[in-house]
Amino acid sequence: MSGLTQERVAERLNVSTSLIAKFETGRLVPMPDTAAQIDKLYGSGDLVQELSADARRSGPPEWFRQWPDLEREATSLRYHQPTYVPGLLQTEAYARAVLTTGLLTPDEVEANLAIRLERQVAVFTREKPPVCTFIIDELALLRGDPAVMKEQLLHIAEMAERPRIFIHVVPRSAGLYAGQMGYFVLASLPGGGDAAYLEDPVGGRVISDPEKLDEFSCLWDAVHSVALPRDMSQDLIRRMASEL
């Protein structure tokens, strides 16, 4: 088994070769089910599962740990982000730039970056990915180093062409609108359940209270009402990229 190529391992695990490469270089930590498959493939007992579990324990803060699991299970995800490009759409360069603007140490930046990239893989490489709708404020697409932002904008435009991904931009001309106070996500879960996630500068929380979820659903409708249609949003994003 030790002679297996990345391509053969990827084929056996039904994942991409790029994902295997990221596991090998430590840029991503395997999900529990993937770690179990790797142990089975290599006959390594529980070694990979134990190592990945240790990496997760030293990774995201307690208040965030529940959300990636919900994100992976969701049948649909609705993201509203007035200040940054949503994490699931971030390039590696942009994500690193965002993480280094805070109070994280270099090691914490790299750990959080790996988690963010892993979340993208977990959501978008599923056999049937969730329907993902993103609403991003135009001003959020203007912040950052021009070279990083050009790559980021082109990446968003490419993602918007995928099936089951819908990206909308709130133009500057919208003025003040509901939802500018902060970022939130709504997840529809198998079996009809829902959850919301929101963050502030020092933490975050998952919300499952039905009354609060109704309020967030109304807030989503209000934000969606001022966003550009999908095609117009794509045109705006590509035009912004061309100007950098």
Image (tube, grey):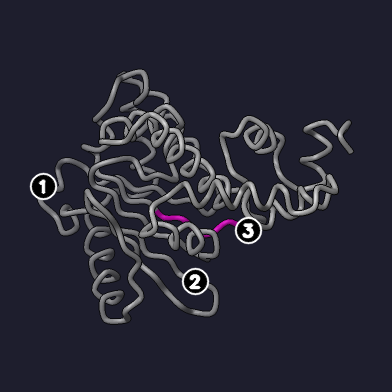
Residue 141, given in percent of the width and then of the height, sits at: 28, 34
Q: Quadrant of the C terminus?
A: top left
Q: Quadrant for the N terminus, please.
A: top right
Residue 150 drawn at (x, y percent)? 37, 23
What residue is shown at x 80% (from left), y 53% (from top)?
45
Three-letter amino acid code of the residue under disc 3: Lys
Residue placed under numbered mark 2 in the picture: 189
Between 166 and 141, the one lying in front of the other is 141
Label 2 Cα crowd, 10 Å radius (few <14 / some 14-19 / many 20+): some
| Element class at badge 1 | loop
Q: Earlier in the sequence, mark 1 or mark 3?
A: 3
Which image quadrant for residue 178? bottom left
Label number found at residue 175: 1
Relative to 157, say whether 239 is above or below. above
Q: Is residue 129 magenta?
A: yes
> Label 1 vs label 3: CA separation?
37 Å
Camera sees residue 153: no
